[in-house]
Amino acid sequence: MLLKYKKFCLLIVTLLLSWQVNADKIHDPTKPQLKSLTSQTMSKTNTITGQVEKVSMPAMTLQGIMDRRDTKIAIISDQIYAKGDKINGYIISQINHDNVVLVNSETQRRLYIYE
């Protein structure tokens, strides 16, 4: 009886040790995304000719928003910004609880957390 119990325990231990843990595949929404520094293509309409042009620009990722006393701060692509700061030709016009509004002379862009 004791021999069967030892074999059973050895089998259980062997199965547990051979079972692969895939913890690296779990998505952490708070981890900064380093791949956000790659460029992305956006459409831009030429105001003179009216033609749509493809423009390559650095990607921006909203990673977090902090509310510090009277000021909200946004973490975008591993950098800290406040309302009125400039980033890649845009000005931060609003920092809301889950998004940031960026504007320039031609377009308005909204970045969302966990996008």
Image (spheres, helix red, strand yellow):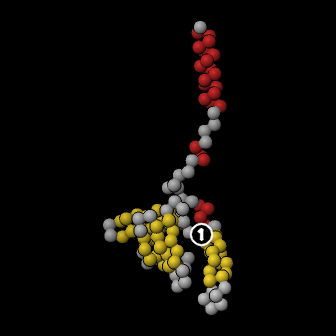
Q: Position of residue 52 (x, y in %)?
A: 66, 82
Q: How many marks?
A: 1
90 lies above or below 68: below
**Residue placed furthest toward the top:** 1
Label 1 Cα neighbours within 10 Å, binned few <14 / some 14-19 / many ≥20: some
Q: State the residue at coordinates (32%, 70%).
A: 70
Q: Position of residue 22 (x, y in %)?
A: 61, 42
Estimate the x, y position of residue 13 in percent, counting from the top left. 60, 25
Q: Secondary structure at mark 1?
A: loop
Q: Position of residue 79 (x, y in %)?
A: 50, 67
Image vertical order of residue 80 relative to residue 114, above or below: below
Residue sitting at 51 percent across and 60 percent down? 114
Quickly name the residue at label 1: 59
Q: Is 49 left or right of 99, judged from the image as shown?
A: right
> In the picture, residue 42 is in which quadrant?
bottom right
Q: Most extreme residue toward the front, as rendered?
A: 50
Q: From this viewpoint, is residue 86 visible?
A: no
The quarter of the image holding the N terminus is top right
Looking at numbered disc 1 in the image, what kind of residue is underneath it? Ala
Residue at the limit of the structure toward the bottom, as seen here = 48
Q: Is residue 100 visible?
A: yes
Q: Residue at coordinates 49% horizontally, 75% vertically from top-left?
A: 102
Instruction: Indicate the quadrant where residue 107 lies.
Output: bottom right
Q: Quadrant of the C terminus?
A: bottom right
